[in-house]
Each structure stands twice: as structure tokens, then as C-alpha cells.
Image: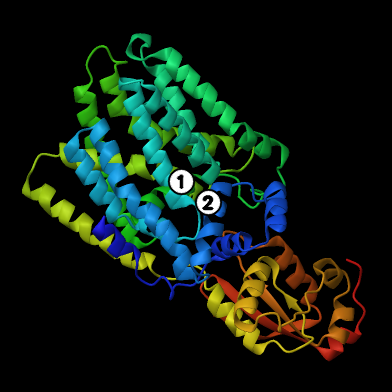
């Protein structure tokens, strides 16, 4: 836990916030009326985390203070992983699992985000631990703790439902004589009642929150796997993924050798569940995306504990040898490198918005697009309420670019391609191309700020309706 804390503290202030973190801070800082109104309309996901964050930021509104909350949950997940690994595979695997989580770049990143991921992972690990204990000792205490942690995980992120669904499928696979069915059924009924508001929100308050996700591509599965192994798509992460795949294979064949009749026993459930946890949520999200795209690697961080458990079991099952020692030493070095890379800025909204704020002149329009949140956030932090912007309507600018050019010879455009180009910005730039030219372009990590200057001769020419 001390090492986990040490690895999650660097560069909390120096690393720029990314878009969703800015949204978290903005949402948590609203007055209660605006907060609940937005939660009901659009931001119902992660509601439990937002409520905790609202209380936490009273300690300070700096980004480092806000990140400490996620770090606390991340560090607390280390002993939880030990407990779960010990419950499923034994004490040795529990210790290895805790260490692997400690040096996981994916978990380090999640623990530094001002988002709900580290808290959700903690709840999922605890829920699975209580499930395993409930199946062996179905006391009311174990059943109640399982229900509460499971429900809390969903109210921190709706994708946690995919893991809970996997748990239900796995328990139904068990032979009836191996479980106290009636208490488990009652627990599921109680869990269903607690999750009814979340289900109602998902089905009745769909305002296109996931419309930006692209249709599924096989390479996205690889993207997700690299994310779990090394926190991102670097060459080091790919090398680490190859070693993890070997360790997962060793774990799988070791489990196959330990399977005995009856196959649907509780002992075999413990061995097999991490594999189900790793495969079923990802497979479900990928197949469902052909009807409605929902497959996104960051949301499927829900499978990280399962991935770590399988790798840890593979390490424990691999007989000691010089090859094993060398491979694990290389893997540790690669993992620590990916941790260092995780401290780098992912989206430089701080630098890009400070540049824009320093250069935009009064009366010059700013087409901020997705960056409207960061622009308002950093404007308030650096200038209070003294800085005002002309934020024109995109549709009007697209329909009458010459009119815009005659009244505003200089305009600013924030380009944020994210995972695919923002359609509104692409359409705007295409409409403005006949009358504006790019005078300056400043690139930041994942964000570009463009200064467009009107061409007087082009601006005088009328543009066709098309």
C-alpha cells in the first residue's frame, strides 16, 4: 500500500486535466439545483462519485486535492485485491495480485483521474470477494455486503453491470447442491430493487451520451488489451502485453489440469470465474455494439482485476527457472516504465486554453466546440468572471460564412479530434474554407488552437447556398 501510494502521487499538479476530469470538477462545483437538474437530464452515470467529490472539494478546489480522493480508493484496492486473490486461488496469488495492481500503469492512471474508475474497481473487487464468501458461507452479513458493494459499483459507473451479469451467469452454472439458492435469489432481488432507479435512468433518460462511440472494430479489442497491460498504446505496453498473454496461457492450462469431477463445484468456480470476468463483459459489449456502439476501452477497465488475477495465477503456476526469473524481471521493468509514461499529460487543455486566453482579443469569436467546458473552467480559474467571450452559433456561421467574415476578420477555432473528428468542427472548417485562411496554428497534446483570418477578396464574394 505504501508503494502504491508512492507510485500514484507524482505530477498531480503538473499533469493537465483531460476533458472528462474538467467535467467532473465543473459538475461537482455547481449549486445543488443545477447539479440535480443536470444529473436528471444527462449526468446520472457516476452519481455516487460526484456526490463524494462535491463533499471532498471543500478541502480545496485544486486538481491535486481532487485527485487525492481517487488515489485513496486506488490504494485501498491493493489489500482488497489480496483478499480476493487469496479467496479464489490462495495466499500466494493474493500477494502477487496485490503487487501487480500496485505497479499497474492502467491502475495508476485510473487512480490519478478525477473520475469514478478507481472507486468502481474497489467496489467490484469487494463485491466479488463477498460473492465468493457468500457462496461458501451464505450468512446474511455476506449477502448484505455483496448487495451493497455491487449496487454502489453500478452507481459509480453503469458498465459495472456487465460484471454483475457475469457473476449471475457464473453462479447459475454451479450445481444446485453447491449453493444456498434461496439466499442468493433474495440477494439478487434486493440488488435488483436497489438498481431499479439506475435501470430507469438508462432506458428513460438516454440523451445520446454514447453516440460518439464508433461501431466496433477488431483492433479495438487489442486497444483494450494494451490498455489493461500497460495503460496505453506504447511499444512498451505491447511488449508487456505479450508477456501477460503467456502468463494467462500458463494460468489457463494450470486450471484445466486442476479441474476434477464434479466440474460444477465451488472450487472450480473459484478457478474459472476470473476468466469469465475477463471475457464475458468484453464479448457482450463488443457484440452489442453491432446494434448500438458501446465498446470503449476505458469503460471496460471493469475487467482489470480479472486480468491481474489471471496473470498472478500464471506467475504462481510457472515453475521456478532461470527463464521465469528473467521474464518476470523484464516484465517488472516494462511495467515501471509504463507507470512513468502514465504521468504524462493525455490532453493538454491547460496549455491550450491558457494560450487561447492570452491571445484572443475582445470581440473575436471563439468556436470552442467540445472545448467549451475547458475554456470556461480555465477562464474562471485565471480571470474570475472578468473574461467574456463571443461564442457564436455554429449553424449560422456555416450558412453565412461571408457575413461572418465581414463582421469578424479574425476568429478562433478549437480542434479536438479525440477518438474521431468532431463533426461540428469539421463541418464548420469546411464551410469557412472559401473565405478564411489559417493564419496561426498552435498544437498541444490532443488539442489544436487555430486562428483564422478572413480573406477580404473572398469575403466580398457571395457564397452559394450549397
Question: Mark 1 or mark 2, which is nearer to you?
Answer: 2
Task: Choose top left, top right, bottom left or bottom right for residue 316.
Answer: top left
Q: Residue at x 38, y 14 (%)?
A: 180
Q: Which residue is mark 2?
A: 49
Q: Which mark is residue 372?
A: none
Label 1 packing within 10 angstroms: few (<14), some (14-19), many (20+): many
Task: Choose top left, top right, bottom left or bottom right for residue 33.
Answer: bottom right
Q: Residue at x 21, y 45 (%)?
A: 96
Label 2 packing within 10 angstroms: few (<14), some (14-19), many (20+): many
In the shown orientation, is residue 297 left or right of residue 277? right
Q: Secondary structure at mark 2?
A: helix
Q: Given contact means CB atoms under 8 Å apart, are the residues at marks 1 and 2 in contact?
A: yes
| Residue 208 visible somewhere in the drawing | no
| Residue 450 visible somewhere in the drawing | yes
Q: Position of residue 255 (x, y in %)?
A: 23, 28
Q: Which residue is mark 1?
A: 120
Residue at mark 1 to residue at mark 2: CA–CA distance: 9 Å
Amino acid at each position: 500500500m505504501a508503494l502504491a501510494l508512492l507510485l500514484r502521487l507524482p505530477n498531480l499538479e503538473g499533469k493537465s486535466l483531460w476533458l472528462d476530469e474538467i467535467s467532473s470538477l465543473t459538475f461537482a462545483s455547481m449549486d445543488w439545483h443545477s447539479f440535480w437538474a443536470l444529473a436528471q437530464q444527462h449526468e446520472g452515470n457516476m452519481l455516487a462519485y460526484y456526490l463524494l467529490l462535491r463533499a471532498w472539494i471543500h478541502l480545496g478546489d485544486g486538481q491535486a486535492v481532487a485527485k487525492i480522493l481517487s488515489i485513496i480508493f486506488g490504494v485501498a484496492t491493493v489489500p482488497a485485491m489480496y483478499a480476493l486473490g487469496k479467496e479464489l486461488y490462495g495466499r500466494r496469488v493474493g500477494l502477487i495480485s496485490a503487487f501487480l495492481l500496485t505497479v499497474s500503469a492502467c491502475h495508476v492512471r485510473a487512480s490519478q483521474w478525477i473520475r469514478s474508475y478507481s472507486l468502481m474497481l474497489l467496489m467490484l473487487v469487494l463485491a466479488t470477494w463477498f460473492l465468493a464468501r457468500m457462496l461458501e458461507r451464505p450468512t446474511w452479513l455476506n449477502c448484505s455486503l455483496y448487495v451493497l458493494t455491487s449496487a454502489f459499483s453500478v452507481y459509480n459507473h453503469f458498465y459495472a453491470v456487465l460484471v454483475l451479469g457475469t457473476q449471475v451467469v457464473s453462479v447459475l452454472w454451479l450445481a444446485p447442491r453447491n449453493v444456498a439458492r434461496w439466499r442468493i435469489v433474495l440477494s439478487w432481488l434486493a440488488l435488483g430493487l436497489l438498481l431499479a432507479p439506475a435501470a430507469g435512468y438508462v432506458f428513460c433518460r438516454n440523451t445520446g451520451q454514447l453516440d460518439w462511440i464508433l461501431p466496433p472494430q477488431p483492433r479495438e479489442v487489442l486497444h483494450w488489451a494494451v490498455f489493461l497491460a500497460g495503460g496505453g498504446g506504447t511499444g512498451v505496453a505491447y511488449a508487456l502485453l505479450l508477456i501477460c498473454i503467456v502468463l494467462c496461457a500458463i494460468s489457463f492450462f494450470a486450471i484445466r489440469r486442476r479441474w476434477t469431477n464434479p466440474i460444477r463445484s465451488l472450487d472450480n468456480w473459484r478457478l474459472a470465474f476470473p476468466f469469465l470476468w475477463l471475457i464475458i463483459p468484453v464479448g457482450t459489449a463488443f457484440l452489442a455494439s453491432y446494434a448500438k456502439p458501446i465498446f470503449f476501452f476505458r469503460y471496460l477497465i471493469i475487467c482489470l482485476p480479472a486480468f491481474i488475477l489471471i496473470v498472478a495465477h500464471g506467475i504462481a503456476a510457472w515453475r521456478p527457472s532461470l527463464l521465469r526469473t528473467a521474464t518476470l524481471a523484464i516484465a517488472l521493468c516494462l511495467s515501471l516504465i509504463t507507470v512513468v509514461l502514465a504521468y504524462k499529460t493525455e490532453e493538454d487543455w491547460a496549455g491550450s486554453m491558457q494560450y487561447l486566453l492570452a491571445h484572443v482579443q475582445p470581440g473575436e469569436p471563439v468556436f470552442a466546440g467540445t472545448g467549451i467546458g475547458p475554456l470556461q473552467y480555465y477562464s474562471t480559474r485565471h480571470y474570475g468572471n472578468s473574461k467574456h467571450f463571443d461564442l457564436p452559433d455554429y449553424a449560422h456561421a456555416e450558412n453565412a460564412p461571408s457575413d461572418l467574415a465581414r463582421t469578424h476578420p479574425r476568429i478562433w477555432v478549437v480542434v479536438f479530434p479525440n477518438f474521431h473528428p468532431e463533426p461540428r468542427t469539421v463541418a464548420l472548417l469546411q464551410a469557412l474554407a472559401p473565405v478564411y485562411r489559417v493564419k496561426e496554428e498552435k498544437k498541444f497534446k490532443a488539442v489544436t488552437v487555430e486562428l483564422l483570418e478572413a480573406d477580404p477578396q473572398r469575403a466580398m464574394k457571395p457564397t452559394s447556398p450549397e
